[in-house]
Image (spheres, rainbow, N blue to C red):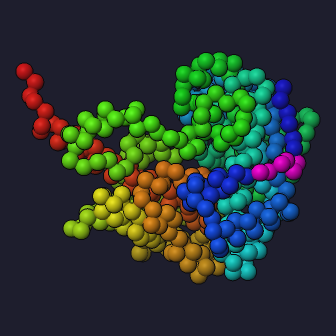
Amino acid sequence: MIELAHALPTVDVAPAEYRRLLGYPRDHVLEERAGELAAAARAWYAEHGRPWVFARQAECLELADDSVHIEGVPLISDRLHAMLRQADADSAVLVAVSAGPELERQAQQLWLEEKPDEYFFLEVYGSAVVEHLITMKGAELCAWGEAVLPHYSPGYPDWDIAQQALLLDLIRRNDTHELPAELEVLESGMLRPKKSLLAVFGLTRERNRVARLSELNPCESCSYLSCQFRRAPYLGAPRRIDPDDFAETEQILSQLLPEPFVLTRGARYSANRKALSRWAATRLTLTQLENGTIEAVFRYEGTTCSNLGRPLLFDYHATLGPREDGYVIRALSCRPVPGDDGYRSMCRYLDDAARLMSSIDREQPLLGEPLDSVLSWSAAPSAAGCYCELGDRMHKWRLVLETIHYALVEREQNREREMFATTSPESP
């Protein structure tokens, strides 16, 4: 049985992964002020950070009709259930990782000292540390002989964050080790320290079965590029596309279509397509102006994480350049819906209303980039419905821009279907 506890593990966040979480393209070079801030955050954490990881193999794993039972505790997640069943998983490893409370305290101090830039870069570095720790733990588990499935956590799609407490109790259910440091679940389901993660890794002996299920192959989402157990290339790594592979298809399409593609078709979004389709239909409004620019408005509905979960409404506005320019993001804004005051119950608002609302108002991620850039922007996932932390806000911006991207791709594809329908010869 696997049981591992490490305090102060080696942390070496890849620069490309840090840039990705900051919202820059993977090959972007941080210069001047941005480079100084990134280096300062990395140096501070190297001296003061206290990361830790803990993992233990569950004694039994059973799949019921609608839930995953680990040591008799039911965990309700359709996606986790489907992943484990399709891969014929026979065991699970329960994992907790944390960047430690020191980073959270330092970030709070920077905020109080009115240093928002330093706060931002350190907060994002904390998210990068958590991603690094969970990635390294997955790579370590690969060495134990079985195929390791991608980790899954409460707060991810189809897994209620309220089950964080159940998973933490399961992780603590061992006779050998205690967690290397304190970790608690708040009433909202969020963790303290917040730069922490609880996860389940499924294990299976059916390696060939995992290889057939490409969407379950953990190697494709694992950024540990030097891993000796890698079974598939990392999809986030830069790839060279041989134009000869698509020459014939491009030639045919160029003859049929009046305009070339400007948005990636069949993109891998962070949100599932059903959710994007629903949001595009019910929350998003697209208006094309005479000069070719597009005005997009997205209505966000959420709740605060404290004060009994007060509902709140925000409108996201995005101005995109013309299609022929790649739908460049020209302007972004996020503001509470007029007449709604739910945002006044957020804890950060109660601490310092002016600073929080100023931060929300001035943040414009991916400004000046083509809309396709959202596909390579992996803002750290956040299950929080509020806007208190930068990571919560960036996660929402990513979902908004992905919804706009999805809606525009669907619009272009529908236009092409209509064109083909009118130009194709009738069936005899």
Please determine whether, in this image, residue 133 is positioned above or below residue 62. below
- Residue 81: quadrant of the picture: top right
Determine whether, in the image, residue 257 is placed left or right of residue 13. left
- Residue 57: quadrant of the picture: top right
Q: Position of residue 184 (x, y in %)?
A: 78, 53
Front one among 59 and 417: 417
Would you say residue 380 sits in the magenta stretch? no
Residue at 81% across, 45% down = 53
Residue 244 in view in this figure: yes
Residue at 72% across, 35% down = 227
Determine whether, in the image, residue 401 is placed left or right of residue 39. left
Q: Position of residue 204 (x, y in %)?
A: 68, 22
Q: Position of residue 49 (x, y in %)?
A: 83, 59
Determine whether, in the image, residue 13 is placed left or right of residue 384. right
Front one among 274 and 207: 207
Residue at 63% across, 24% down = 63
